[in-house]
Amino acid sequence: MAQTFGTPLIGRAGELTRLTDVLARARTGTPRSVLVSGDAGVGKTRLLTEAAAHAARTEMTVLTGHCVDLGDVGLPYLPFTEILGTLAADDRFAAAFAAHPAVDRLLGARTGAPRTGTGTDTGTGTGPDTGTRTDTGTGTDSGGTPGTDPGTRLRLFEGVAALLAAVAEITPLLLVLEDLHWADQSSRDLLRFLLSRGLLQPAAPGAPAHRLAVFASYRADDLHRRHPLRPLLAELVRLPSVDRLELRPMADAEVARLVRALRAEVLSDTTVRRIVERAEGNAFYAEELLAALPGDVDPSAPAMPSGLADVLLIRIEQLSDTAQQVLRTAAVAGRRVEHGLLHDAVQLPQDTLESALREAVGRQLLVPGEDGTYSFRHALTREAVYADLLPGERVRLHRTFAGLLTGRARSAERAHHSRESHDLADALTASLEAADHAQLLGAPAEELRHLEAVLELWSAVDPGARPRTAGPVTLTLRASAAAARAGDAHRAVALTRAALARAGSDADSELAARVRYTLAGHLMRVDSTKAAYTYSSEALAMIPAEPASHTWVWAAATHVMAARYMGHDEDAHRVARQALRTAEELRLPDAQADLIISLVGLDGGNRRTPRGRERLRRARDLAREAGNVSVEMRALFNLAIGCYESGTLDECLTWLSEGLERADRSGLLSSPYALELRYLQSLILYTLGRWDECARAAASDAERLPPAGGFAVGPALYVALARGEDGTVERARALLDGPFDWMASLVAGIVLTDAAALRGDPEGAVAALRESLAGLSDVTGSERPDIGVRLAALALSPVADTAVRLRSAGDASGALRWAATATELVELARTTAAKGEDGTRQGPEGLAWLARAEAEWSRACPPADGTAEERAVAAWERTVSAFGYGDPYELARSRRRFAEALLTAGRREEAADQARAARDAADRLGAVPLREEVDALIRRGRLTGPASAADRVAALTARESDVLRLLARGRTNRQIGEELFISGKTASVHVSNILAKLGAAGRTEAVAIAYREGLIEPEPTASA
């Protein structure tokens, strides 16, 4: 295969495994064929190139033949003449060619002359017949050589089969036939013969087995109903030795990986997402769209790369004029169009329209739907057709569709067509209607898009044609609220600032206050608490508390939150109590709910108490009564976090489920509190050791989260780090890209600090801790973010290791230097735990991390009074007890240190018990690095004797048993990882452990031992 690629094969591991398995069987004498289908550009050639490279590495001879689109002028047997020409140039096969002279006809057909002049039956002196070929048996065979008969053709086919069989005796052979959809009739007939009667049939008794595989590719989207390849495929797939492999479009995540791999420079998430959306799983389309980007990788790519458009339009131009007219009209309608609407727009007789549609469907350009619609098979095909329209033609068709949609409940489509036909007044009206409809459906992202269109059109439309129900300031505020609900807090801030600028000095005090307290609320969500407090103070000062008003109550509620964030608790208490009385007087239940939640938060630690949670439940009920879902979700979040802080994790999960279900029903899964709930749910799953669920939830959420919501799946990064998965640190650093986000910085700080600790890098761990705390403190104004306790404990681990190592090596000054760092870190943990962000002591989790920090510090700074061993044992015993509240991973890490301390103190049996418990937990969780540390401790301390064979079999963990069952099904390491939501590297470690425990030399032997020992049951087979 001449083609080479500079990037790794992405997204086709399973398909490549199927092909390499066929190759392995072929080398041992079991010939097979695989028909590889897929749309143009989906990756057939790349997959076959990788398979061919694998075959070459395993000492197979690879021969490739290409079919070429020559229209009505075809060259007979073209792919086979290419294959035979390659064989003929190899001296190893000279004797085989001499033994099968019938094939010389094909070699002569390559140049128009016979290969030899020996008088053999070669069709002497004739080149290929390029005219129409019919197998009539009346003087011209369908191979295209005049003057021969069907018997000669049969001898040719048998000669080719015999030659290839002889070659396969000399070397294992892989034949690759590319683009069968362009194959001529003669090539199709020869392929039918080879697969049904020749090469793939069992060898005669005593004859050598055929060491051969045939891979053939074709474009599925080129096979219209009357395509001549269809009957052959239907015949071949019924053969027992022929398999079919369909390459489906790549998953979005795989296309994103491909796009990033193709560019050396870093691409923005927006750019990658746009390419992924347009490519729809097609690798070639993704590459073309990427190549069309400007040099500065600006996301504003051309509407359609010219080279790609040319490729796509070739298929369109093969249609009749009427079918092309229908496609052009359908392209203006969009990706999908109803039959009735298309009929009204194209203005053709029904039978003419149906004939044109049948042609487009037959060519697989349009796909009919069950609901009377037609869709373009690929969005880029629609884009290419649309881009090829003349400007006047485009405007005329858009005007037609806008008129047809007037009066229908299709305002979003009407707005688009009106805008494209330059009817801006109707576009503005329709966009506002579409925004109202999106709001009713709970679709904030779509509502935002339509409102932004309204604001953009506002100044271009005559004042008399504008809606009178709202002005630009009110509409901008509404757009900012939609942006917040869609999870784009920074866009919400920008829009509210625009509303502030639009309001100017002429706005009435109530509207001016609304703009300011709305801006304050959005600023708090992007952690600009100082600016939020400034604007909330201005809002409160703009309108009097008397007479009581709705606006003042909400301004006060916002100010209470901002004042609390700034540490002005007395001011917050005073305003909250006054506002709550006013809200009760005005009968504003959602404002009451919001203020009750704030007051619970102001009473330090109150949400952890039964009384505090009772007040939060009342707030939830009030918000639900008012229909204010955002406030209701704030109440549910506080209920959940209060349970988490008090260690009642099961009750926490109950509140989380209710909150996320409510958000889902309301279309608010991307709103701020919904994202916080999703993060907390993921954190609970991680904390409880339900890591596979955590990883699955993260994989499911990743495609639905807004760009600013990446932190919500942060605990899955904790899982990945604990399991030793590659790329975890890079994923954590990616959370820090873009505008500052407090939660993303918190997640990244934990991962980066722990990653440095795991690799034994004290400088890196301390640097990550300091950088994280500096960023978190700057935006909140808090000197002691609660996460400081955990970060200090994590960083203390490598610091203590280094101090211990230097002390053992006799470097007293170095040990003292790191001991001083350890003291600084433990003081940070102590002061934060005593009085954190809200001025209260930490809950069970924080106290557990404090216990670990103290224990790590005791290693770095042992007392000189001879009690170091005793104190270390006591410190780690307290840590193990503290983490018993429900964190199996941290409990296991603490047990490992506890075992180490016990071993140093000479308490070997207790040390062995703790080590075994830590190892069991590490196995159960798939925490490979931790298990390796425990194993090293067990070996170093000789805490167990050599295991018997029976012990080895019984020692398989639950995770290893899962891996073993998949091994028995023939899964590769990567496939095992995908099914169990672990990395391929982790799966490989499990496989190695299984082989060692079972005493097996390889995977096959391990499976055999497992069946023999009853560790796995044979898979049930379907009854006939």
Image (cartoon, rainbow, N blue to C red):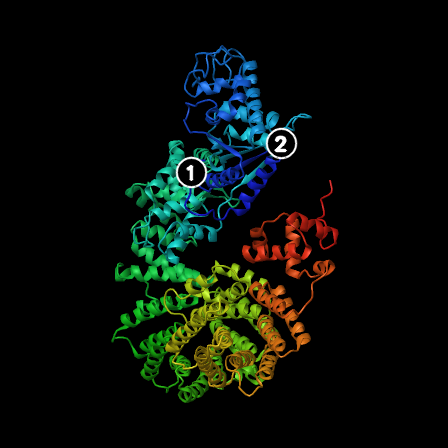
Label placed on residue 239? 2
Of residues 847 and 511, the one nearer the viewer is 847
Quarter holding the N terminus?
top left
Q: Is residue 415 left or right of residue 634?
A: left
Q: Is residue 507 left or right of residue 724?
A: left
Q: Taking 987 as reference, is 548 above or below it?
A: below
User: Could one spot residue 111 in this view of the protein?
Assistant: yes
Quarter holding the C terminus?
top right
Q: Taking 392 as reference, is 608 above or below it?
A: below
Labels 1 and 2: the sequence-earlier one: 1
Do labels 1 and 2 touch, CB within 8 Å? no
Q: Is residue 552 left or right of residue 975?
A: left
Residue 831: where, in percent of width, then height?
47, 85
Number of residues whose C-alpha sits closer than 10 Å to that of mark 1, classed few (under 14), some (14–19) or many (20 or more): few
Give the residue pinned by disc 1: 3
Query: What amino acid is at disc 2?
Result: Leu
Residue at image location 65% in from the left, 54% down from the top: 995
Residue 1007: where, in percent of width, then height?
68, 50
Find numbered disc 1 in the image and state the secondary structure of the residue it sits on.
loop
Find numbered disc 2 in the image and state the secondary structure of the residue it sits on.
loop
Which marked residue is nearer to the observer: mark 1 or mark 2? Answer: 1
Query: What amino acid is at disc 1?
Result: Gln
Residue 51: where, in percent of width, then height?
51, 40
Number of residues whose C-alpha sits closer than 10 Å to that of mark 2, classed few (under 14), some (14–19) or many (20 or more): few
